[in-house]
Amino acid sequence: MTSAIRRITEANRASWNAIAPVRQGEPAEFFENGGLALEGFERELTGDVRAPVDRC
């Protein structure tokens, strides 16, 4: 792994480790039923990230 990728990966890991204690886990069914675990400000930043579902 290059040093740049290693630095980015470590920064990402540190960020996830920082928020992990304050984020509650959700069961898979929550997400299967369309649930989102994003905070309001995160939803504003990302916009609609849901993929269309083709239900035959």
Image (cartoon, rainbow, N blue to C red):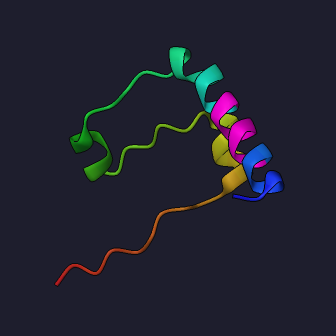
Q: Is residue 33 above or below residue 53?
A: above
Q: How many marks?
A: 0
Magenta segment's dominant SS is helix
Corner quadrant of residue 4:
bottom right
The residue at the point 41 percent across, 75 percent down is 52
Q: Give the left or right position of residue 25, taking residue 15 as reference.
A: left
Q: Give the left or right position of residue 48, taking residue 10 as reference.
A: left
Q: Give the left or right position of residue 34, taking residue 22 as reference.
A: left
Q: Is residue 8 above or below residue 38?
A: below
Q: Is residue 39 above or below residue 20?
A: below
Corner quadrant of residue 28:
top left
Q: Whole-percent x and y of residue 37?
A: 47, 37
Q: Residue furthest left?
A: 56
Q: Quadrant of the C terminus?
A: bottom left
Q: Residue furthest top?
A: 21
The residue at the point 37 percent across, 27 percent down is 25
Q: Whole-percent x and y of residue 7?
A: 79, 44
Q: Give the left or right position of residue 47, taking residue 56 as reference.
A: right
Q: Whole-percent x and y of residue 5?
A: 75, 55
Region in magenta: 8-14
Q: Whole-percent x and y of residue 6?
A: 73, 48
The residue at the point 34 percent across, 51 percent down is 34
Of 5 and 16, which appears nearest the observer? 5
Q: Is residue 16 magenta?
A: no
Q: Quadrant of the N terminus?
A: bottom right
Corner quadrant of residue 48:
bottom right
Q: Residue furthest bottom?
A: 56
Q: Residue furthest right?
A: 4
